Image (cartoon, rainbow, N blue to C red):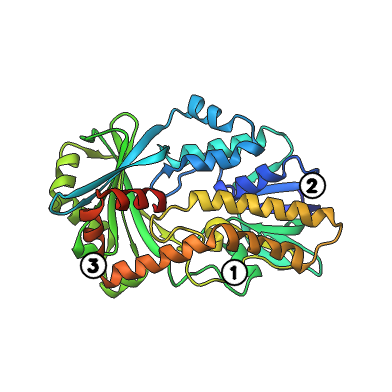
Amino acid sequence: MLTEKTMDVAIIGAGPGGSAVAMGLKNSGLQVVLIDESNFPREKICGDAIPSWVLTDLEPYCAAIHETFLETMKPGIFSSTSMLLSNGQKLNFKWGKPGYMIPRLQFDNFLLDQVLASGKIRFFGGEKISKVHKLDSGYELFNSEGKLLLRCRVLIGADGASSLVAKSVSARGSKSRSAGHAVRAYYKNVNLESSDTSMVFFDKAFSPGYFWIFPLPDNRANVGFGMPNTSRLKRNIKLTKASEEFIKSNDSVTRILKSAESEGPFKGGILPFAGKWKPLAGLDYILVGDAANLLDPFSGDGIRNAVRSGLFAAETILNAFQTGKLNPDLLKAYESLIKKHLWPQLKQRAKLVKWVGRLPWLVPFVIRIGNVGIVSRWLKTWL
């Protein structure tokens, strides 16, 4: 317990974004605490696909993390993706670097273990923050019992799509009009065509959403369906019901899951897609990952941007503390990094999703011409 102790940095949320901030600060000499409402390992609703770039990005801050991950976690590896239409037509393409399939329960716990192995970051698991109170300099954080837990000079919101930090410290709030929802379930005894190919299925009846089957080790798979809220709410689509209909009506999906057994019900979560730009930092706070609505609106991937934004936050904090005095411009430098390295592509992808919603023939058209050399090369680069 750190009651009434003032820390330099408090990070709320120990997912990939929060762990990345902590990893970037572990050798800074600053007093840093990482807080999460859950005890780890904990379940996280996700497609469970981990881009290899995530570990490459973390390598400078945690030596041999990529090698350690492969040796200790033994993830599934996917090197290609198939995009399939309901008529069976498909587009296959290989990734420049393979990705990994591993439940987030395991992956997030692995990242946290790497952070705590340094012995320089304090961690409170199972500690829910119920209130954030602004001070003249910094913040007071209160636990679920309403008692003061600690004070901090800088507060990092890495607490996901329903971020308490975003609601408390930023006029932007935590909700995004461009949000979506997704559901996923685990299946075993899956008749996978290839253990190293992720599959994405499109049907005009559910456009601009998509259904996925992502292979896990031991003939298991992460199976799910996601859709932007604008389309989902307008058409009153229930994602669990839509997933069940997709499994029954799509011949390819039916064949793959014919002998499979569900390991539990579909579970859902918010997808805080990037949309209209909103403030991400201020005098003494920074929002990262899903709390900053940095999820890719086209692919649904939020892990790499969570990690990259977390590392940008750590870089910004280090620079700010080196001056000896915090000011809005110093922490606002974080937004410049986001705008330079992440935002241009996120804006493009947000526009594409809008076009897909307006022109349901667009995805089928791309899949039909996708095997043409120049189109194939563009897709591999862009996706």
Comes first in the chain, label 3 or label 1: 1
Q: Dividing the picture into quarters, in which one does residue 292 lie?
A: bottom right
Is residue 127 something that shows in the picture?
Answer: no
User: Measured from the top left, where is residue 199 in percent x and y?
Assistant: 28, 45
Mark 2: amino acid: Leu
Q: Which residue, as the protein is rendered here, is positioned at the far front?
A: 374
Q: Determine the residue positioned at 78% across, 57% down.
A: 320
Vertical arrangement, residue 6 with respect to residue 25, above or below: below
Determine the secondary structure under disc 2. loop
Q: Determine the residue positioned at 44% across, 58% down.
A: 296
Determine the secondary structure under disc 1. helix
Mark 1 — residue? 167
Mark 2 — residue? 30
Q: Foreground: 124 or 300?
A: 300
Q: Mark 1 to mark 2: distance in Å?
A: 26 Å
User: Measured from the top left, where is residue 94 in percent x and y?
Assistant: 33, 40
Q: Mark 3 to mark 1: distance in Å?
A: 35 Å
Q: Mark 2 to mark 3: distance in Å?
A: 51 Å
Q: Nearer the viewer, mark 1 or mark 2?
A: 2
Comes first in the chain, label 2 or label 3: 2
Q: Residues within 10 Å of mark 1 (few under 14, many from 20)?
A: some
Vertical arrangement, residue 10 with respect to residue 117, above or below: below
Vertical arrangement, residue 223 with respect to residue 76, above or below: below
User: Measured from the top left, where is residue 57 in percent x and y?
Assistant: 58, 42
- Residue 360, disc: 3
Q: Nearer the viewer, mark 2 or mark 3?
A: 3
In this picture, residue 86 sits left or right of residue 34:
left
Comes first in the chain, label 1 or label 2: 2
Mark 1: amino acid: Lys
Mark 3: amino acid: Pro
Q: Determine the residue positioned at 15% across, 51% down.
A: 250
